[in-house]
Amino acid sequence: MNFAKQIAMAETAQQRFVCDSAMDFLLMETVSLMQEGFDSIEEERDAAYLRMEQLGHRVGMGLAERATRDRPRFADNLEIVKFICKDFWLPLFNKQIDNLKTNHRGVYVLTDSSFKWFSRMSADVAAETPQLALVHSAFPCGLIRGALSSLGVSSSVVAEVAAVPQCTFQIKFR
């Protein structure tokens, strides 16, 4: 039984709603907490991004270890990225990645056109929303990098937020 099926069997619609709300609030408060105690706004955002990415890395490692426990090893990097897009993303966000592109030289671009954590995000000024979303994208970047690390692949993951709620993750294998 795969990871997504285990989670789907163990929950009802009401439980999922509570979990989604709890995760939204936890993410907002964690980003806020990570920004405290710095002199400038830029320092706050940089520190929060780094801390959230590290936190996501640890969580991603644990989730990938659990999800691949009863699976044979992956044949190549493309299979690993497909696993991230389908089996890893589905239990976290109730959907698969919308688009996967590659240049076949170690760079993969994953696009989620309606990223769940950005769906209700807004700032006082509309132009600030993508900047705000960028700090919140550090955790999923860490999730992806941690999952890849757990699968034995060294990588860097960068998010790009052009317009909320769309988010693009660029994965570069080292």
Image: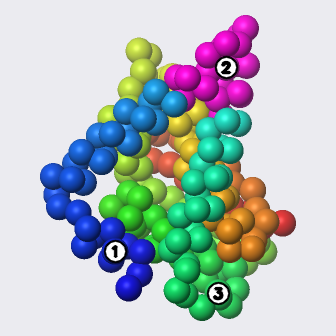
Neighbours of disc 1 within 10 Å: few (<14), some (14-19), many (20+): few
Which residue lies under the disc numbered 3? 74
Q: Nearer the viewer, mark 1 or mark 3?
A: 1
What x and y, as percent, mark residue 140?
A: 55, 50
In contact (CB < 8 Å): disc 1 and disc 3:
no
Alpha carbon distance from label 1 to label 3:
21 Å
Label 1 sits on what residue type?
Answer: Gln
Q: Nearer the viewer, mark 1 or mark 2?
A: 1
Q: Which region of the structure is painted magenta?
A: 31-49
What x and y, as percent, mark residue 61?
A: 63, 62
What x and y, as percent, mark residue 7?
A: 33, 68
Neighbours of disc 2 within 10 Å: few (<14), some (14-19), many (20+): some
> What residue lies at 55% left-to-right and 23% top-to-bottom?
33
In contact (CB < 8 Å): disc 1 and disc 2:
no
Which residue lies under the disc numbered 1? 6
Which residue lies under the disc numbered 2? 44
Q: Earlier in the sequence, mark 1 or mark 2?
A: 1
The stretch drawn in magenta includes residue 72: no
Kindly give the residue lying farthest to the top in the view shown: 39
